[in-house]
Structure formats: structure tokens, C-alpha cells
Image (spheres, rainbow, N blue to C red):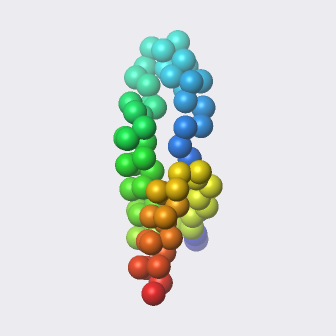
Amino acid sequence: MSFGAKPVRGAYMEKERDRAEEMSYPSPIQPNKAATDRDYDLALNYALENGVFLVSGSHNDSSNLLLTQLINRKWH
């Protein structure tokens, strides 16, 4: 069996924060952009290291460059 993932950053941030406040649970949203970028990049690395099929649709140039570097290291 295979597993695929599409990591996203920033999707539904406002809705999730509002929902958490309305339902009285801690917000599941990252506290800032730096934390979001760090964890997104960690997810890319984790996926490639653990055989997860990955679709990356990021507009973040740094993360896209990182992904190409990770792919090159893994298969070259």
C-alpha cells in the first residue's frame, strides 16, 4: 500500500482560528510565518525520507528549491 500527501500552508487560516475560538479549543494554526515555513519544509523532508508520495503546490520559492535539492540528493 502507498501513501500520498499534499502539504499546504495558509489554507483556511482565518476559518480555523475563528472555529477554534468559537468552540473553545486551542488554535491549530501556526503562530507565525517562520513556524509555518519551518514545519512545511520539515514535512517535505519527512515525506521524501519515508517513501510518501508527495504533491507540492507551494508558491514559496525557498520551499520549492529545497524540494528539488531533496529530490536530487535522494535519487542521484
Q: Residue furthest bottom?
A: 76
Residue 44, placed above or below residue 13? below
Q: How many marks?
A: 0
Residue 23 appears in the picture as rendered: no
40, 22: nearer the viewer? 40
76, 19: nearer the viewer? 76
Residue 74, placed above or below residue 58? below
Q: Is residue 14 left or right of residue 71?
A: right
Residue 44 in the image: x percent, y percent?
A: 46, 60
In the rendered image, which quarter is residue 4 located in? bottom right
Residue 60 appears in the picture as rendered: yes
In the rendered image, which quarter is residue 32 located in? top left
Seen at 37% across and 41% down, the residue is 35
Residue 43 in the image: x percent, y percent?
A: 44, 56
Seen at 54% across and 18% down, the residue is 18
Residue 44, placed above or below residue 25? below
Residue 40 in the image: x percent, y percent?
A: 45, 50
Seen at 55% across and 30% down, the residue is 13
Seen at 59% across and 51% down, the residue is 59
- In which quadrant of the rendered image does the C terminus lie? bottom left
Q: Is residue 73 left or right of residue 59?
A: left
- In which quadrant of the rendered image does the N terminus lie? bottom right
Residue 62 in the image: x percent, y percent?
A: 46, 57
